[in-house]
C-alpha cells in the first residue's frame, strides 16, 4: 500500500476540480470580505469539526482580530490548535482561545454574555443520518439542532453580532430522515429571529473525508485490516473540506438576513460511495476484491497482507431508514437566485416565522419528550405536523446495524 495525498485525491477523483469551486467568488468579493472580517471578534461554535475548522482556516487570511472557539471535544480543540500553530503560512490573531464545553450549557452562557462578538458562526450539530435510531437518539438530535439553536439566538439578541451564521444541510430540502427534518426545523427557528439579527445559513453537499463520514472511515478500515463497505445505489454531491469552509465564510459575511446559500452543482457531479471506494483503492495501488456478504468481506480482510493487491470490499443496496437515493438543495416552493455569485445559489424571501409559533412548536416537543411511553413514530408524527413536506423513509433498520 502506497502513501497518498488526500487533498490531491479529492480534487482528482471526487470533486474533479483542480481549484476550489468558490475561488472566483472569493476573488471577486475579496474587498467586501476583508471589510467584514478585518480586526473583527469571531466566535466559532463546533469549531473543532471538519467544517468548523475549515471555516476558521478560510477567515484567518483576512486578518480577524480575535478568535474564540467552542467545542465539546477537548481532543478536537487540541488538534485544531496544533494544526493552526504548526502551519508556517497561517495567521493566528493574538487573542486566540479555545473552550471545551457544550454550547447549550451554563458555562457557555457566561462566556457569551461577558463578550461582544462581531461574528457568531455555529457548526455544532448532530449531522449524521446514523443518529436516527430510536426516540432517545432523536430527542438528543432535536435538542441539539433545534432547542440549542433557539437558546443561542436568545443570547445573540441580548448581545447582537453583525453576522449570525448557523450551518444547515441539503437534507433539509424535502427531508426523508429525522436529521434533515431537525435541520429544517432549525431553519424555521432561525427565520423567526431575522427581524432582530442578520442571519444567514447554508445547505451543502457531503464533505469528502469529513470527521465521522464513510470516506473518513476508509482510512481506518485499511489501517485495521477491515473491509471497505459502501452503498452502491446512493448518489451524493461532494465538496472538499477547504470548499466547505469557504462556502460558509461567503454565506456568513456576504449573506443578507434570511439568505440560504447552496453550491451550484450539477446532477452529473453526484457520485456513489462505491465509485469513490474503487478510486480510493486504485490510488493506493490496489483494486477491489468484491464480496457477496459482510461475513465474507470480514473473513478476507482478516487474512489480507500487503503482498495482495486486491482488497476486500462489500457494496450493497441501501436498506436503512432515512436514506434518499439522491440529493437536492432547494424545493419548488423556494425563491432561488442563481446569478448573484459564480458558484453559489441563494434561496431568498424565506418565510419569517412568528416566535410565538416557534415557542408553541418546541413546547409540544418538550411535552412529548416527557411522556413515559414515547416511541420514534410519535416524534416522526409530530415532525410531520410542522413539516408537511417531511416524507420519512422508515425501514426498521439503522446504520448501526451495518458495517
Image (spheres, rainbow, N blue to C red):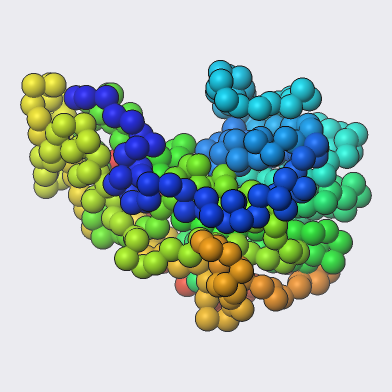
Viewport quadrant of the C terminus: top left
Q: Check the image and report above or below for 220 versus 156.
A: above
In the displayed structure image, the side of residue 54 where residue 305 appears, left or right: left
Tally the numbered discs: 0
Hey, which quadrant is residue 383 in on the image? bottom right
Viewport quadrant of the N terminus: top left
- Residue 255 position in % (x across, y down): 70, 60
Report the residue at 10% width, 34% height from top: 310
Hey, which quadrant is residue 103 in on the image? top right
Report the residue at 48% width, 65% height from top: 264
- Residue 150 position in % (x across, y down): 76, 54
Does the image show residue 265?
yes
Report the residue at 66% width, 63% height from top: 187
Report the residue at 91% width, 49% height from top: 158
Does the image show residue 230?
no
In the displayed structure image, the side of residue 398 where residue 79 appears, left or right: right
Front-most of residues 199 and 75: 199
Front-most of residues 169 and 387: 169
In the displayed structure image, the side of residue 344 where residue 214 appears, left or right: left
Q: Check the image and report above or below for 310 versus 143.
A: above
- Residue 12 position in % (x across, y down): 30, 45
Amino acid at each position: 500500500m502506497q502513501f497518498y495525498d488526500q487533498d490531491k485525491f479529492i480534487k482528482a477523483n471526487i470533486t474533479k476540480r483542480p481549484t476550489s469551486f468558490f475561488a472566483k467568488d472569493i476573488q471577486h468579493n475579496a474587498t467586501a470580505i476583508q471589510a467584514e472580517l478585518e480586526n473583527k471578534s469571531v466566535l466559532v461554535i463546533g469549531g473543532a469539526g471538519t467544517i468548523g475548522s475549515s471555516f476558521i482556516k478560510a477567515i484567518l487570511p483576512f486578518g480577524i482580530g480575535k478568535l474564540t472557539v467552542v467545542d465539546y471535544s477537548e481532543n478536537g480543540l487540541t488538534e485544531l490548535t496544533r494544526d493552526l500553530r504548526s502551519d508556517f503560512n497561517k495567521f493566528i490573531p493574538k487573542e486566540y482561545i479555545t473552550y471545551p464545553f457544550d454550547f447549550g450549557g451554563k458555562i457557555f452562557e457566561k462566556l457569551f454574555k461577558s463578550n461582544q462578538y462581531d461574528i457568531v458562526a455555529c457548526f455544532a450539530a448532530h449531522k449524521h443520518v446514523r443518529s436516527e435510531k430510536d426516540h432517545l437518539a432523536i430527542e438528543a438530535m432535536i435538542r441539539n439542532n433545534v432547542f440549542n439553536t433557539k437558546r443561542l439566538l436568545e443570547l445573540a439578541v441580548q448581545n447582537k453580532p453583525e453576522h449570525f451564521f448557523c450551518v444547515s444541510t441539503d437534507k433539509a430540502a424535502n427531508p426523508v430522515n429525522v436529521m434533515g427534518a431537525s435541520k429544517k426545523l432549525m431553519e424555521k427557528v432561525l427565520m423567526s429571529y431575522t427581524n432582530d439579527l442578520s442571519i444567514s445559513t447554508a445547505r451543502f453537499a457531503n464533505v469528502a473525508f469529513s470527521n465521522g463520514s464513510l470516506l473518513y472511515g476508509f482510512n481506518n478500515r485499511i489501517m485495521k485490516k477491515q473491509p471497505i463497505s459502501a452503498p452502491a445505489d446512493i448518489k451524493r454531491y461532494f465538496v472538499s473540506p477547504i470548499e466547505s469552509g469557504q462556502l460558509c465564510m461567503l454565506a456568513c459575511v456576504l449573506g443578507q438576513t434570511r439568505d440560504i446559500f447552496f453550491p451550484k452543482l450539477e446532477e452529473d457531479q453526484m457520485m456513489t460511495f462505491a465509485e469513490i471506494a474503487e478510486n480510493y483503492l486504485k490510488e493506493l495501488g490496489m483494486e477491489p476484491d468484491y464480496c457477496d456478504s459482510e461475513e465474507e468481506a470480514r473473513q478476507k480482510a482478516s487474512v489480507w497482507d500487503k503482498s495482495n493487491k486486491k482488497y476486500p470490499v462489500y457494496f450493497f443496496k441501501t436498506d436503512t431508514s432515512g436514506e434518499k437515493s439522491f440529493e437536492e438543495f432547494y424545493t419548488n416552493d423556494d425563491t432561488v437566485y442563481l446569478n448573484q455569485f459564480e458558484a453559489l445559489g441563494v434561496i431568498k424571501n424565506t418565510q419569517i416565522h412568528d416566535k410565538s409559533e416557534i415557542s408553541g412548536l418546541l413546547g409540544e416537543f418538550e411535552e412529548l419528550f416527557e411522556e413515559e411511553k414515547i416511541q420514534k413514530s410519535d416524534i416522526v408524527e409530530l415532525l410531520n405536523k410542522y413539516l408537511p413536506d417531511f416524507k420519512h423513509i422508515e425501514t426498521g433498520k439503522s446504520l448501526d446495524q451495518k458495517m
